[in-house]
Amino acid sequence: MQKDKLLTAIVDDHPIVIEGLKNMLKNEANIEVIGGFQNGAEILSYLENEKVDLVLLDISLPDINGMELCLEIKKKYRSVIVLILSNRTERSIVVQTIQNGASGYLLKNSSLDELRRCITEAVKGSICYSKEVMEILSRPSRNELLAAPRLTKREKQILELIAQGKTSQTIGEELFLSPLTIDTHRKNLLQKFQVRNVAELIMSANQQHLL
Amino acid sequence: MQKDKLLTAIVDDHPIVIEGLKNMLKNEANIEVIGGFQNGAEILSYLENEKVDLVLLDISLPDINGMELCLEIKKKYRSVIVLILSNRTERSIVVQTIQNGASGYLLKNSSLDELRRCITEAVKGSICYSKEVMEILSRPSRNELLAAPRLTKREKQILELIAQGKTSQTIGEELFLSPLTIDTHRKNLLQKFQVRNVAELIMSANQQHLL
DNA sequence: TTATTTCTACTGGTTTTTAGGTAATTTTGA
DNA sequence: TCAAAATTACCTAAAAACCAGTAGAAATAA
């Protein structure tokens, strides 16, 4: 279809990943890897002077967030195709990158075939996700379903103290409250988290990043 | 020094990383990559029949924790050298892998030179860390001062069930054991973690990445 | 200012955990 | 094969947590 090869840049802070991609892509007839870049500044300065068709971009970079970088590249160089290659599986991140102009999103554990497929699709102008990413997008975002319970100030405070292994007695003394009051808060915490005891409570609170 | 090449296996769930490492190592005179494996089961079954000198091992694998896998490999095949290649920067994880017999720990963003250096060192029998990992190890680790306790299989199992909010009664039924036995394990867990109750236990286990 | 939420505290009763042991088996490693 | 570690199981007793309510006071938002 095209006479010229796709000039491709790889942006990833892991040299190993850069090597791997270079190696994989060097056998592709229509792709020429023009370089690997370990941070956002490098690729941006390269883009100022050189022509690039395709950027394979990691989300986690040392100097700038990959999502931001994507937006910046698309703003300045509309025609550059950006494909995200990342380990992050959060729905919100996938959605954000696409909104920022990326032409696709692949997890790093996707197969070589998937990568090839996505590059082809992206060049054609469509947006392409790897299989896992499709799943992430299609499911109604689990952790949004079981929303982290809204805790009051007191509850948060007492949750902390419970996590420190303190008894209702001790907590009561520490806060100048009746231990019976602490028991009530305890009960309310169990209810809000829909769990049966502190073991489950602490697990759940940890998973919800509330501790 | 050596006549034969080091038979090297790469274990990582990212095909791209496997490709990258293969590519990097194929120019090394004394290394022969005999395969890439995307999960723990694959490498373990390979090891049963084939000779391997060096395993480059990722911590996050789909089927088994890399730390556990390391321990398992070292238990069964003492002479196999295991080098950890991971993104995880938690001190406890680094320490744990070394306790489990790994000969070194590198972050994935370490340079090719560092990887080469560490392989050389590991073959010589010493333990080798990449620069960043050295820093992680040297800083005095706030809440991780006390090393992660070594848990037996049963204890790990029961810890899991406690974290799920189950009572000694329930756990006993589930494992066909007397609830009194579960109580004993419970007691031992509290002692090993040096905590007073399950709340603190679950917190500590979480911080130590044992859950 | 009213309505709602949050915080406080209680009653009374049940279940579970924790703390201090001991000790017989079974498994495992050297 | 022998010692150590792990697993199993028990006793007694106190402490703590959990369950299901009610209810007044204080703070906050509409």
Image (cartoon, coloured by chain):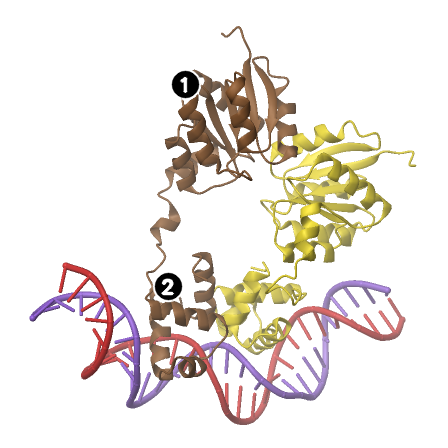
Chain colours: A brown, B yellow, C purple, D red
Give how far across and how far down residue B52 sits, in percent.
79, 40
Chain at tag 1: A
Q: Does any portion of residue A116 appear in the rendered image?
A: no
Q: Nearer the viewer, residue A55 or A120?
A: A55
The kind of residue on which mark 1 rests is: Gly
| Image-quadrant location for residue A178 | bottom left
Label annotation for residue A125:
1
Type of amino acid at the residue the image marks with label 2: Phe
Instruction: Decide: few, some or many residues near mark 2? Use Cα within 10 Å; few <14, some 14-19, many ≥20.
Output: many
Q: Quarter of the image holding residue A148? A: bottom left
Q: Earlier in the sequence, mark 1 or mark 2?
A: 1
Secondary structure beneath dot 2 equals: helix
Disc 2 target residue = A193
Measured as percent of width and height from the top left, residue A33 is found at 60, 20
Q: Chain of mark 2?
A: A
Q: Residue at x 46, y 57 (%)?
A: A207
Q: Position of residue A55 (x, y in %)?
A: 51, 24
Left/right of residue C10 with respect to residue B15 in the rendered view: left
| Residue at the spot 57% in from the left edge and 26% down from the top edge | A10
Q: Where does the image place residue B198, in percent across and percent down from the top left?
A: 52, 72
